[in-house]
């Protein structure tokens, strides 16, 4: 009997927290969580796997070309006796600018 009362109190507390913090009611929250099934999760994992394969193939193809990605002026390389520190600062900035432009163009076409 005591376990049932504690369980009910926990469920009421959780319900109150969800009602206060979440803008939808408990029934809508239960409906939203039940709509997302394992098949949807599998599709998301499959999508990210395909994206990773495409990125990997692009990196392999770019590695075979003689583009100076990773060897730009501004990339920091320190070679000591037993250590090597490499920070591709200019490459990071270049990739950031290129990705920002690509995402900007994509967002302009989606409108």
Image: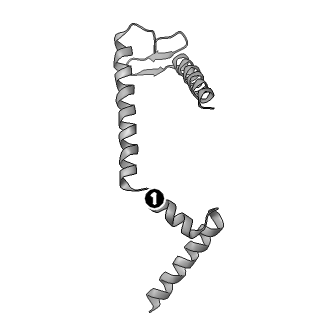
Closest to the observer: 88 or 79?
A: 88
**Residue placed furthest toward the bottom:** 1
Point 34% across, 29% down: residue: 53
Closest to the observer: 95 or 80?
A: 95
Point 44% across, 87% down: residue: 3
Q: Determine the secondary structure under disc 1.
A: helix
Point 59% across, 67% down: residue: 18
Colour convention of the picture: one colour
**Relative to 57, residue 41 above or below:** below
Image position of 86 (left or right of 13): left
Query: Which quarter of the image is occupied by the N terminus?
Result: bottom left
Residue 45 image-quadrant placement: top left
Query: Which quarter of the image is occupied by the C terminus?
Result: top right
Q: Position of residue 26 (x, y in %)?
A: 56, 69
For label 1, the residue is 35
Q: Position of residue 71 (x, y in %)?
A: 46, 11
Q: Position of residue 8 (x, y in %)?
A: 51, 83
Q: Position of residue 72 (x, y in %)?
A: 50, 11
Can residue 56 be seen by looking at this rendering? Answer: yes
Residue 68 image-quadrant placement: top left
Image position of 102 (left or right of 66): right
Residue 103 image-quadrant placement: top right
């Amino acid at each position: 009997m005591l376990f049932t009362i504690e369980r009910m109190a926990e469920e009421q507390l959780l319900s109150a927290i969800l009602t206060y913090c979440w803008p939808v009611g408990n029934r809508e929250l239960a409906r939203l969580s039940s709509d997302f099934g394992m098949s949807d999760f599998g599709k998301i994992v499959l999508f990210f796997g395909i994206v990773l394969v495409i990125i990997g193939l692009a990196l392999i193809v770019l590695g075979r070309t003689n583009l100076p990605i990773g060897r730009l002026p501004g990339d920091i390389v320190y070679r000591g006796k037993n250590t090597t520190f490499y920070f591709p600062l200019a490459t990071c900035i270049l990739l950031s600018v290129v990705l920002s432009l690509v995402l900007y163009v994509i967002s302009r076409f989606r409108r």
